[in-house]
Amino acid sequence: MATAHFLHEQTQRHYSDAMRILAALLLLLASLPLTAATGTPAPPQGAESNLQLTQCMSLQGSLSRQTTALAELQAHSQALSSQRELERMRNESRIQALENEKARLLSAAVIAVLILLLAAATSFGLLLRKRHRQLRRLSEVDVLTGLGNRRAATRKLDALAAQRGPDGTRHVLFLIDVDHFKQINDSHGHHVGDEVLVALAAKLKAACRPTDLVARWGGEEFLVACTSLTREQAEQVAARLRRAMAYTLETTHAARLITVSLGLAPIPFFDSGDEPSPASCWDYALRMADRALYAAKRHRDAWVGYWGAQLPDNATAEAVLEQPEAADGIVTVMSSVPRIVSTSSAAARARSLKALRAQG
């Protein structure tokens, strides 16, 4: 800016000098004698005329030099102006590039923040799901034995009852109770009773298949559900579980034999095809297994099972549930103790089927 201002002042000064010289030159030219109309210069009139001519030529040279200097200054001024314009355009280009870079960095920063927020939200969601699964698992696991609890077993039994096994097979419920468990608590303390439950749970888990449902049903009762078994296979499983869970408890005072009793029943209980009925639900089979367990507890260290056949039209499932041993031809009684089966057969012969007829 200072250079441009200086050039502008120089141009104005040279222009003023050139105008003054031009004016002086015009005055001298006007004072010189002229020739006639032919245009031929008149001869000099003494020393004064020569002086005026010399001054005129000097002024003309000065004017020429001033004009040349003025042209050079104008050319230099234009060059500086072009240079300033070029510099301005370069500065604007740099500014635009910086603004573009700033916008790019801002966009990258925004994207990075969004990615971090998304990653944080995803991680938090996965953590919540993991915690939820852990809490759900903890809510469905028995704290003492590590087996599934009653809540978990109920949910799995609902899914199991909705399925059907191959022809000739049914799902089977086994209800298991520890013999004389109250005496164990009373004689040795509840801590020993807990040790017995933990040991029995481990033995039961080891004796079952990975696909079997194994749970602590409550207190000293355990529940096992096996899929797709025939009646003969159900008997074999009951015998294997009874043997696997029996063991000798070593205490500070004496050794004590620990045994269990089992009751079993199929799902669906009656062989009625795929027709839905209350007896096809797992809770009916559980009630039958509970009655079978009650019969086994009379003997201890035994297993009893009830296996339903076709339910005739003149009998109801509730009537059969009340007296399963008396339902001859409808319920087959199985047991590890022959006396229980013979007693049930005698009771079946002694009772009439009228007790099982539907009550209007």
Image (cartoon, rainbow, N blue to C red):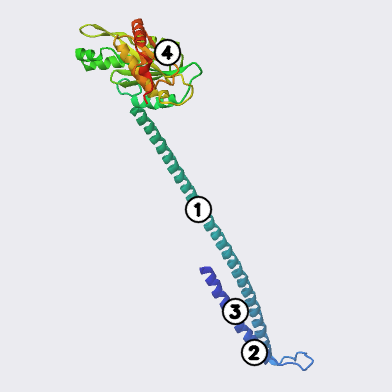
Asked if labels 4 and 2 touch by Cβ distance under 8 angstroms, the answer is no
- Looking at the image, which residue is at 58% across and 81% down? 16
The residue singled out by tag 3 in the image is 15
Q: Nearer the viewer, mark 3 or mark 2?
A: 3
CA distance separating discs 2 and 4: 156 Å
User: In the image, what residue type sits under mark 2?
Assistant: Leu
User: Can you give x and y, in whole percent of width and height, for residue 10 in the image?
Assistant: 56, 74
N-terminal-most mark, 3 or 1: 3
Give me the residue at 62% from left, 77% from top. 66
The Cα atoms of the two marked residues, 3 and 1, are separated by: 51 Å
Which quadrant, please, contains the C terminus? top left
Q: Which residue is mark 4?
A: 329
C-alpha span from label 4 to label 3: 139 Å
Q: Residue at x 44, y 40 (%)?
A: 119
Q: Looking at the image, how many numbered discs can be counted on the residues?
A: 4
- Categorize mark 2 by other alpha carbons within 10 Å: few (<14), some (14-19), many (20+): few
**3D distance between C-alphas at marks 1 and 2:** 69 Å
Estimate how packed mark 4 is, as few (under 14), some (14 to 19) or many (20 or more) residues with alpha carbons within 10 Å.
few
